[in-house]
Image: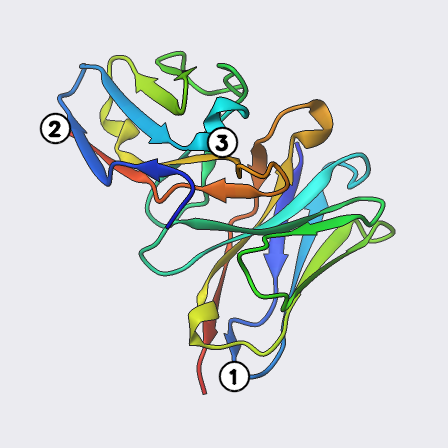
Amino acid sequence: QVQLQESGPGLVKPSETLSLTCTVSGGSIRNYYWSWIRQSPGKGLEWIGYIYYSGGTNYNPSLKSRFTISVDTSKNQFSLKLSSVTAADTAVYYCARELASSGYDAFDIWGQGTVVTVSS
Amino acid sequence: SSELTQDPAVSVALGQTVRITCQGDSLRNYDASWYQQKPGQAPLLVIYGKNNRPSGIPDRFSGSSSGNTASLTITGAQAEDEADYHCNSRASSGNHYVFATGTKVTVL
């Protein structure tokens, strides 16, 4: 079955750029929307944005435009970049597959999550 | 303030029924999805669409909606159902997604 695995540094310094990658295994990245979602310590989930396998993107307008999501279909991966990080960006970052291409607004497969701490 | 709101916590006796609600204007136009999250784990989709369960989700989980309120019902709650439950849908604008803050369910 399809599995997602996030990878990236666990510690980032303030003002630097965070880069995370989600690798899709057991299935193709094609024909789906793929999202990044984060969860700050002790808080709820926050949708960051999605990318369609062909490259179209959509981001949460409530977040400042510091996020960039990209896709590499040849590697079956999609990525997240967050610039100018602050302590407020400390969170568990999840990648997830959307069912939007099947007509449903839901995230049916999630990665295990990767903990990102912003600290000097 | 969040576009979707949930009660912070609810408790249910073992084997009894509990309903978790999610309120928001966007729910008048868009379906909610529900996720179960246990400590240290990623969220798990339990209900999507009008009332669809992914493969492997027990049929004691069901979803419903009326007006601006979506509900997740656990009929015959089990000890393993103790978790946080998150509601998700589109924002009122329809062009992005929002999550509510979650409800902690305690099984007594």
Amino acid type shown at disc 2: Leu
* Along the viewing direction, whichever of A57 and B69 lies nearer the viewer: B69
Can you give x and y, in whole percent of width and height, for residue A25 in the image?
Answer: 71, 43
Same chain, labels 3 and 1: no
Helix, strand or loop under label 2 = loop
Q: Residues within 10 Å of mark 3 (few under 14, many from 20)?
A: many
Camera-nearest label, 2 or 3:
3
Q: Earlier in the sequence, mark 2 or mark 3?
A: 3
Camera-nearest label, 3 or 1:
3
Task: Left or right? Give the position of A6 relative to B101.
Answer: right
Marks 2 and 3, how far apart at CA: 33 Å
Q: Chain of mark 3?
A: B
Helix, strand or loop under label 3 = helix
Q: Quadrant of the C terminus of chain B?
A: top left
Residue A97 visible (yes or no):
yes
Q: Which residue is mark 3?
A: B26
The residue lying at 32 percent from left, 18 percent from top is: B73
Helix, strand or loop under label 1 = loop
Q: Which dot marks residue A13?
A: 1
The residue lying at 28 percent from left, 13 percent from top is: B75
Marks 3 and 1, how far apart at CA: 38 Å
